[in-house]
Amino acid sequence: MAIPRTRLPRRAAQEYFRNIRRLIEEDRQRVWKAWQDEIRPRIHGHRRIMRGPAINAAGTETGGFRANDDMDDINRILNRLRDMAMTSNFNEASLQFIARSFVNTINIRTRLNFHQQVMRVVGFDPTISEPWLSSFLETAVQENVSWIKSIGTEYHDKIKSIVTQGVRRGKSINDMASAVAEAGNVSIRRGRFIARDQLGSIHGDLVKARQTKLGLNRFRWRTSQDERVRDSHEDLDGQIFTWKDGARNERGERIWPGTDYACRCVAEPLEEELLGIAD
């Protein structure tokens, strides 16, 4: 009877991305409202002053100071938006919950899958005792907390750059508005990439750890077998590799399933390897 396939728990990544996207959307809506209600009017005011006379009727220079006041206000607004994002959307407790749920779901699904594969061949459960697992999972959680947090910090860095450089270089309000909107889209694409990449990476590392700690030395490479599989990985499909050496990608780098960027490939155990541990 055939060994059950190694399956990538894609729903975990889908749920992970939904949670990340929710944080991004709430934050970008707040930024867009501030752009419309607070930042854009101050940019208009700043430009009117810069175009007007620099000396008032009493002979006192005023324009430069008032223009600086507008820019100081804009910077305070941008800093306030960043602080709000880090304390509400991207706060530590929320990120810990999202990342921990994601990592734990991958672990549960991966362990069940491996349990089914081994039980089919040798009839015992190798996942009852895994003293290494707690440290592995905690490391993965903290890495993903950092990944999610980086989305927020990079987004607000970009917004500040768009506004301050746009004002300094005289860019049109419409161009700046488009750039502000696109910055949110970039964050969403980054969140989607992180979810896909981390799914393959964590799953691949868990599979490798479980197989090698059980004494398995080789695996069969399997792609996701769809149109998004890159050519260099398609060439690896069905081939057998050792866990020690892995395979090579198109850049000549040593890789294992899930370690290449956004890789959705998996490692299937070999029946003869499983039979070997039962002897």
Image (cartoon, rainbow, N blue to C red):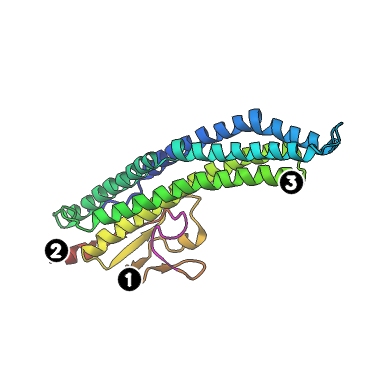
Q: Earlier in the sequence, mark 2 or mark 3?
A: 3
Q: Look at the magenta stretch and give its main secondary structure.
A: loop
Label 1 or label 3, whichever lies nearer to me, is 3
Marks 1/2: CA–CA distance:
21 Å
Residue 59, percent across and down?
A: 86, 36
84, above or below 264, in the image: above
Residue 51, percent across and down?
A: 84, 37
Q: Does the CB distance between marks 1 and 2 fall below 8 Å?
A: no
In the picture provided, is 196 more to the left or to the right than 136? right
Q: Provide the residue designation for mark 2.
A: 278
In the picture provided, is 246 more to the left or to the right than 113? right
Q: What is the tally of numbered marks visible in this picture? A: 3
Q: Seen from this angle, which residue lies furthest front? A: 58
77, 278: nearer the viewer:
77
Label 2 or label 3, whichever lies nearer to me, is 3
Tell me the element at label 2: helix
The residue positioned 47% from the left and 35% from the top of the image is 22
Q: Seen from this angle, which residue lies furthest top? A: 37
Q: Provide the residue designation for mark 3.
A: 168
Type of the residue with mark 3: Arg
Using the rendered image of the protein, determine whether residue 225 is visible from the camera's viewpoint. Answer: no
Give the image quarter of residue 36: top right
Q: Which residues are magenta?
A: 254-263
Question: Can you say which quadrant of the picture contains the C terminus?
Answer: bottom left
The residue positioned 79% from the left and 37% from the top of the image is 63
Q: Does the CB distance between marks 2 and 3 fall below 8 Å?
A: no
Q: Provide the residue designation for mark 1.
A: 244
Q: Does the CB distance between marks 1 and 3 fall below 8 Å?
A: no
